[in-house]
Image: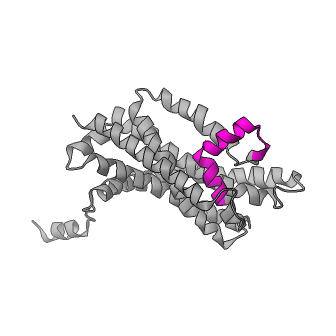
Amino acid sequence: MSVARQAGERARPSPPRVPALAVLHYYLVGYRRTWRAGVFSSFLLPVLTVLGFGVGVGAYIDQGVDGVSYLDWLVPGLIASTALQVAIGDATWPVFSNFQWIKTYFAQGAAPLRVGDILAGHLLYVLFRVLTTITAFLLVTGVFGALRSPLAVAALPVAALLGLAVAAPTFAYSAAVDSDSWLAMLFRFAVIPMTLFAGVFFPVESLPEALRWLAYATPLWHAVDLCRAATLGVAPQWSVVGHLLYLVAWAFGGWLLAHRVFRRRLVV
């Protein structure tokens, strides 16, 4: 072996030895080539929404909402809804594709990787996507002066927990369906209504009582309430512990369900 070749192999980064981190490394290598394609949907679109709704529509709301300007009130809702949409977007077609089209999971299963490693590595990548997107979103909204409290940084772990809470059960759903039409139905009948009625654009209290309790049942509302408390520096409507336990329950239950479906598909 030549000296140049030996030097090249020494310079090449080796994959992590922890199996789940090796799976994460695989997705990060791919993301390094494709990150530009997701900039609009995961970052620019929410920023344009801030300009359109928060600045544009907010100019016509003289009294604001709950004693603050509509822009300041809207931003935490957009933080949570952006985290949800990024997480579900990465937990639908990519997961379905890894089973049905490009068979990545089966290739990973043929390697010395357990089902839990494959699932955990992909969920870690989703978590990375959520955190990078929300970090950039916080920086931009901070420039707009829409973050009224230094506690706004607490929106990052809240967004991360929300991402896991919705991505884990969505992994199970995407792994179980046999057509990508079911993924479009998930967005149409779950993601869009949740985004519209879970307190992102207007207070949940203005809804009829039946719809109000449906909104409370969604993980998005709990993250919105926590993010709003963090960015405005006020107390949430529910207890912080109650919100966090509810989101953890979604994440843990989703993990168990996803692991079961993945195991059924991958282990012969």
**Res. 135 visible in picture:** no
Residue 208 at x, y percent in the picture: 77, 37
View extreme (left): residue: 1
Is 124 displayed left or right of 148 in the figure?
left
Residue at point 73%, 68% (across, down)? 148
Residue 97 at x, y percent in the picture: 39, 36
Is 1 displayed left or right of 152 in the figure?
left
Residue at point 42%, 56% (across, down)? 32
What coloring was used for the rendering? Answer: one colour
Looking at the rendering, in which quadrant would you find the N terminus? bottom left
Looking at the rendering, in which quadrant would you find the C terminus? top left
Q: Is residue 206 magenta?
A: yes
Residue at point 25%, 63% (across, down)? 14
Return the residue nearer the eye: 92 or 154.
154
Residue at point 42%, 29% (across, down)? 177
Return the residue nearer the eye: 13 or 159.
159
**Res. 261 visible in picture:** yes
Above or below residue 175? Residue 116 is below
Q: Quadrant of residue 244?
A: bottom right
The magenta stretch is 205-227
Q: Is residue 259 magenta?
A: no
